[in-house]
Image (cartoon, rainbow, N blue to C red):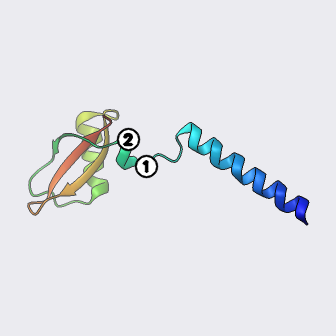
Amino acid sequence: MAKNLNSVSFTVLLLVLLTASTGILKSEAQTCSTFLDECGPAPFLGTNADCLKCCKYTYGSPPACKGLVEGSDKHCHCYQNP
């Protein structure tokens, strides 16, 4: 039982190190945080997914990697990698 537990612990440790070293654990907020421009009409009546579609259609992908409906006036804001 102890050998199995050690094997599992070692395997989990290797997987954590592998994902950390390849950048899989980076969050989108860190990699897609620079404001690009606005997209669509104001107010933007769609969802964040609709906003991202607008950003990708207007600016391409890349550079557009995130679209968020933000502010009290509901604008679609597009973001790119820094």
**Would you call the spot at circle 1 few (<14 residues within 10 Å), some (14-19), or many (20 or more)?**
few
How far apart in space, not on screen, are marks 2 and 1 (Cα)? 7 Å
Residue nearest the viewer, comparing 17 with 38: 17
**Which quarter of the picture shows residue 65?**
top left
**Would you call the spot at circle 2 few (<14 residues within 10 Å), some (14-19), or many (20 or more)?**
some
Label 1: state its secondary structure: loop
The location of residue 74, given as percent across then percent down, is: 13, 59
Residue at 25% of width from left, 53% of height from top? 68
The residue under label 1 is which amino acid type?
A: Ser
Residue at 27% of width from left, 49% of height from top? 67
**Which quarter of the picture shows residue 82?**
top left
What count of labels does the image hold?
2
The residue that mark 1 highlights is 27
Label 2: state its secondary structure: helix
The residue under label 2 is which amino acid type?
A: Thr
Give me the disc on residue 31: 2
The location of residue 2, given as percent across then percent down, is: 89, 63
- Say whether marks 2 and 1 touch (CB < 8 Å): yes
